[in-house]
Image: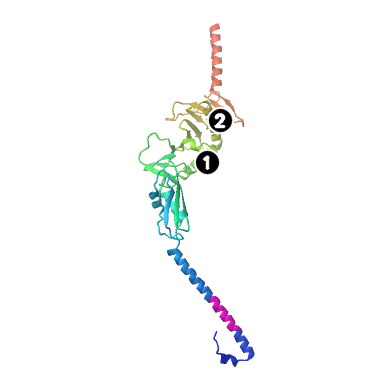
């Protein structure tokens, strides 16, 4: 808006002068607002630049808990954090992810920060729990499936859970292993889910899905659960839980194969070793099966081999008496 001199304003008519003064007042007010906004924006830009360059930088990095595998220097190096890094531009969640991936034996990494610039890293270790054969050797993973290391040869006297499959595994350090075959992955996930629900998973020492019609699971390297096909896995494993509890109550060192191929029917066969799988055939009609348990009823009724042996002994005694009388 063009401003007039006092002489020009004085020569205006009263109506024109009033309109002019009103517009001038609005213009001056808008100029003041614009000046305040521009000044505030300038200050904000200066503060932002300082925050991104001078203020809120990392001044120190320490490791509060190192764990048993890696030292503080290894953990800090894996985080990718450095003194002088700006805290506003640093993604601390990614730093924690880098630690967990670069240092496989780290189960969980936590990074905390303070306005003073002090950064603290805490970690929680994981341990080896599984082993599987891969195209380039063997992969060792924790209970969650995270690959911890790769080795060329199978370790001797390993107590790790063995995962067997017909196909191959995809195993990258610091990441969760998975099956190359999608169907095998789904089958494995289903078995693991049922084992966890049954409370058995952490005591399992082998899962064998190399033959989809003859699935096997080993418990504490001494009880082999023969599951047959994937049909009614949950029912079969529930029966396995009951038999394992019964066997452990009799002898916690029992070595046996537990046939769970028929849902709600369990057949227990004691063996000397699980090193070589023993083939167990399902009973035919009229043929007795050693150590058999029927869990078809809700409460479960059992018929053991001891009862069958007693009946056989009684039959032999009667036969002997008849032969003697003759």
Q: Viewer-nearest of labels 1 and 2?
A: 1
Q: Main secondary structure of the magenta part?
A: helix
Using the rendered view, name the quadrant where residue 21 is placed: bottom right
When the figure is inspected, residue 135 is found, relative to residue 321, above or below; the finding is: below
Circle 2 packing at 10 Å, graded few (<14), some (14-19), many (20+), is some
Residue 28 left/right relative to 83: right
Which region of the structure is painted magenta? 22-34
Disc 1 or 2, which lies upstream in sequence? 1
Residue furthest right as drawn:
15
In front: 315, or 13? 13
When the figure is inspected, residue 82 is found, relative to residue 192, above or below; the finding is: below
> What x and y, as percent, mark residue 61?
42, 54
Using the rendered view, name the quadrant where residue 59 is placed: bottom left
Residue 305 left/right relative to 172: right
For the residue labelled by badge 1, is the local secondary structure a helix, a strand or a loop? helix
> What x and y, as percent, mark residue 10?
59, 92
Identify the image quadrant of the N terminus. Answer: bottom right
Tell me, yes or no, whether the highlighted magenta stretch contains residue 33.
Answer: yes
> Residue 265: in sight, yes or no?
yes
In front: 39, or 281? 39
Specify the label residue 193 is tagged with: 1
> Residue 326: in sight, yes or no?
no
For the residue labelled by badge 2, is the local secondary structure a helix, a strand or a loop? strand
- The residue tagged 2 is 265
> What x and y, as percent, mark residue 22?
61, 83
Circle 1 packing at 10 Å, graded few (<14), some (14-19), many (20+), is some
């Amino acid at each position: 808006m063009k401003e007039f001199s006092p002489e020009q304003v004085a020569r205006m008519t009263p109506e024109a002068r009033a309109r002019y003064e009103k517009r001038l007042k609005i213009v001056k007010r808008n100029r003041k607002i614009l000046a305040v906004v521009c000044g505030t924006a300038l200050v904000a830009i200066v503060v932002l630049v300082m925050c991104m360059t001078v203020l809120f930088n990392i001044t120190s990095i320490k490791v509060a808990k190192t764990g048993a595998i890696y030292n503080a220097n290894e953990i800090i190096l894996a985080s990718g954090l450095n003194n002088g890094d700006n805290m506003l531009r640093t993604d601390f969640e990614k730093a924690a992810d880098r630690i967990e991936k670069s240092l496989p034996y780290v189960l969980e990494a936590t990074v905390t920060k303070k306005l003073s610039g002090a950064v603290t890293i805490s970690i929680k270790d994981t341990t080896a729990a599984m082993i599987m054969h891969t195209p380039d050797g063997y992969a060792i993973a924790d209970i969650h499936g995270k690959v911890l290391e790769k080795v060329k040869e199978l370790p001797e006297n390993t107590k790790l859970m063995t995962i067997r499959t017909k196909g191959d595994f995809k195993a990258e350090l610091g990441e969760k292993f998975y099956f190359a075959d999608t169907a095998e992955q789904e089958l494995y996930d289903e078995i693991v889910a049922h084992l966890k629900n049954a409370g058995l998973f952490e005591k399992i020492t082998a899962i064998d899905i190399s033959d989809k019609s003859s699935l096997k699971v080993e418990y504490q390297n001494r009880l082999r659960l023969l599951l047959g096909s994937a049909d009614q896995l949950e029912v079969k494993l529930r029966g396995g839980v009951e038999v394992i509890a019964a066997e452990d109550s009799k002898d916690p060192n029992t070595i046996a194969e537990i046939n769970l191929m028929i849902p709600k029917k369990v057949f227990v066969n004691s063996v000397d070793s699980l090193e070589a799988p023993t083939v167990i055939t399902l009973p035919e009609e009229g043929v007795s099966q050693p150590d058999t348990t029927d869990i078809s009823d809700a409460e479960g009724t059992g018929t053991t081999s001891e009862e069958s042996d007693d009946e056989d002994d009684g039959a032999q005694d009667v036969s002997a008496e008849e032969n003697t009388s003759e």
